[in-house]
Image (cartoon, grey):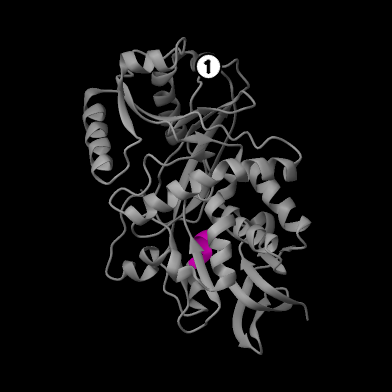
Amino acid sequence: MERYDVAIIGGGMVGTAIGYGCAGHGARVAVLDEGDVALRASRGNFGLVWGQSKGDNMPAYAAWTRRSIALWPDLAERVSVLAGRDVQYRQVGGLTFCLDEQELVARRDFVHRRHNQGHASVRMLDRRELEELMPGCPLGPDVSGASYDPNDGHVDPLTLLRGLHAGLRAAGGAHLPGAPLDAIEPAAGGYRLRRADGSELLAARVVVAAGVATTPIAAMIGLDVPVRPVRGQNIVTERLAPILPKPASAIRQTGDGTVQIGVTNEDDGSFETPTTTAALAGMAARALRVLPPLAQARMVRSWAALRPMTPDGCPAYAESATHPGCFVAVCHSGVTLAAVHAGPLAEAVLSGAVAEIAAELHPSRFVGMTHVQAH
């Protein structure tokens, strides 16, 4: 039976980043993954590396996000080499557009609140300032302003995932797709992991990073981590000449020229991932109000994926009190937090110091809490 220093349950963005980081520090790592059948958020995320909206009324999450963004340039350089192509990380600043006076007032209140919470880099721009920031950008007449954070940016998320997997393999890690996990049981020197295909392995440490499947697997190591699926739908257009120089929270032009439009927040408890005409039409209509020339662009594809959402929309990290050496890591912002997951969190898993670096993000805070919208 194979023995590993660390077994990661989940081969999406969060699990692979942690596995890549652990392997880079010399640990023998196995990433267990359901494979192509997994309902992974990594297929459907928007590719933003984003701080302006993260951590409202949760200072620990805001600080964790800022720490990750600071580490992102180094991660982008390393992962681009590993992936064999540019991961297209561009820290060009990010926008959240407002399309009427009500949205503008609400966004101003939000930015003021963020300033009071110490997030000083985000600010409001009026229409004139937007035009000065992006001269020649064909903004629609309904665009009244936007919030702006110069630290925000975007990336090619599929190349990022490819590079993290390549880095895992290059450091001697194993990616083991194809079967769900049945059990985690204490064994000599660590834990025995049994899978539905009958295979088993031993690991000194275990990290549950299974996205929307986190709750039942975390229960195997004595942790109560409520996670629900929140569906998001996306649209991608054909490649276009440069039209939008900075990414926004629901529309961005990728490095390849396509325009990505999103994203819904469908919180109905379903684990299904259909696209719906009504949702796609609504997203497209808003995008056209931002950039009217998109009316001439052809839609290439649309898709939906599931985000793993905690009751307060913020990440959760913990080591089990009943299963020492077993951890959980769950969040809906796997791209933004990839750098901190591959760096400080992976190091904390190896040293057993997760509680020290993420004490305020422990899932015990969810006791008695009803769920709210994502931060």
Q: Taking 370 as reference, is 216 above or below it?
A: below
Where's residue 41, x and y in %?
Answer: 54, 50
Callout 1: few (<14), some (14-19), or many (20+) C-alpha neighbours within 10 Å? some
Residue at 38% x, 19% y is 289
**Which residue is the site of mark 1?**
243
Does residue 107 show up? yes
For image coordinates 31% across by 16% down, the residue present is: 127
* Residue 178 in picture, x, y percent from top left: 72, 63
Residue 191 placement, left or right of 131? right
Q: Which of the two residues, 222 or 301, is positioned nearer the viewer here?
A: 222
Q: Main structural element of the magenta stretch: helix, strand or loop?
A: helix
Quarter of the image where the N terminus is located = bottom right
Question: Compared to 75, does 326 lie above or below?
Answer: below
Quick one: SS at disc 1? loop
* Residue name at image x 75 percent, y 59 percent: 171
Horizontal side, residue 254 vs residue 57: left or right: right
Asked which quadrant contains residue 114, the reply is: top left
| Residue pictured at 56% horizontal, 17% vertical | 297
What's the amino acid at mark 1?
A: Ile
Q: In this view, does 140 lie above or below 319?
A: above
Camera-side residue of 351 and 267: 351
Question: Magenta residues, as a range?
Answer: 210-214
Give the answer, above or below, for where 25 lies relative to 156.
below
